[in-house]
Image (cartoon, rainbow, N blue to C red):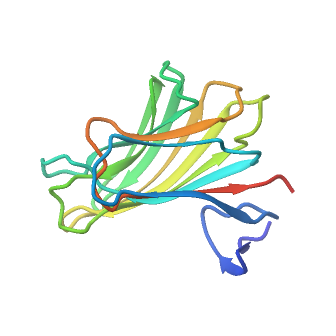
Amino acid sequence: MPITQSFAGLSTLGFGAFPGADYEAIATVTLANSTTPSVTFSSLGNYQHLQIRGIVRNTRAAASTGSDLSLRLNSDTGSNYVRHRLYGDGTSAVSSYTAADSRMRIADSQSNSATSGIFTGFVIDILDADSSSKNTTVRCLYGAETNSLGIVAITSGLWLSTSALTSVTLLDTNYNFVQHSTFALYGVRAP
């Protein structure tokens, strides 16, 4: 399977490549002069896979990585989400598992007390988004600088539902997303 894929005529490498398909830009949300607790993409169309790329920072004042960037699929608030995470900060590596959660905690959201202009960067892949015969699987690669200690992590999640996706909501667990947080949604149609 090739690693290099085509994106609007450009060569791309990496974690988010889908074999034999091209990305289609669907929608982008950038917070201009406001904060918001969530961003929702709806009317997703007939895409086999979805990808969300972005940068995020939250309103938390305490000095720390922040809080969780989470997903809710089809507005499901039931305890139907599972997550695995492998996380490293240059001095230690940590793995964790969460089951029966009311949201899929997919990444850390950078707190507003971090160095000015520092955001968490992330790429989220939502696999088989249009399938109504299997549970939806999600994977995410993210990283950030946290006041001289960088982090990088990979997470995977599972939505315990066989419904095809009609909406994806990104939310911060306890805080709002701040100005300049950006979320871009892409789709890959079945070959």
- Residue 59: x and y in percent read 21, 48
User: From the image, which quarter does the C terminus lie in?
Assistant: bottom right
Kindly tell me whether residue 88 is visible in this rendering. yes
Residue furthest to the right in view is 191
Q: Is residue 67 above or below residue 187?
A: above
Position of the N terminus, as image quadrant, is bottom right
Residue at screen point 70% across, 41% down: 129
| Number of numbered callouts drawn | 0
In this picture, is 150 found above or below 166? below
Q: Residue at x 65, y 75 (%)?
A: 12
- Does residue 184 show up? no
Residue 156 screen position, x and y as percent: 54, 43
**What residue is shown at x 71% (from left), y 26% (from top)?**
162
Q: Nearer the viewer, residue 44 or 135?
A: 44
Residue 146: percent from left, percent from top: 23, 61
Residue at the extreme front of the image, as rendered: 33
